[in-house]
Image: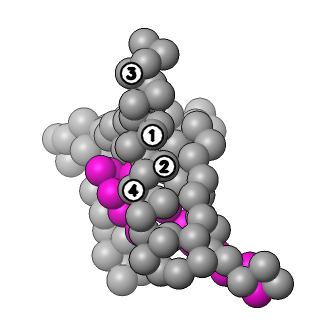
Amino acid sequence: MMEYKGYVGEVNFDSEAHIFHGEIINTRDVITFQGKTVDELEIAFHESITDYIEWCAEDGVSPERPYSGKFNLRLSPELHKEVAITAKRMKISINKFVEKALNDELTLQH
């Protein structure tokens, strides 16, 4: 993984072509990069993000912001009810409850 200006790139190596290739994984827009060496790959990664931001500015659109802090979550009505009741009993919002649950799970994974 590589990170630059909040954008995260995932890298793979093509053993047949002897080239590293990567893609930005935290945006719906397709942003790719490649290089034959780690240094070339890193330069291409930064250039791809810079080009993307410049292209958006020229086109008059906002670049997709990675990780805005918002995401939609679909739950069954039963689970939604349980979450709402439990959050209310804990005297916190549903958002805080979900954030706590996710943080707890991530802590267990590390």
Q: Which residue is mark 4?
A: 46
Q: Which residue is mark 3?
A: 57
The quadrant of the picture occupied by the C terminus is: bottom left
Task: Report the number of numbered marks.
Answer: 4
Find the distance from the CA under tag 2 to the CA under tag 1.
5 Å
- Figure check: 98 above or below 9: above
- Circle 2/circle 1 CB separation < 8 Å: yes
Residue at 57% across, 47% down = 31
Q: Which residue is mark 1?
A: 51
Q: Which mark is residue 48?
A: 2
- Circle 4/circle 3 CB separation < 8 Å: no
Find the distance from the CA under tag 4 to the CA under tag 3.
17 Å
- Circle 2/circle 3 CB separation < 8 Å: no
Amino acid type, label 4: His
- Figure check: 71 above or below 7: above
**Residue 52, percent across and down?**
47, 37
**Residue 78, percent across and down?**
58, 39
Q: What segment carries the magenta color? A: 1-15
Amino acid type, label 1: Asp
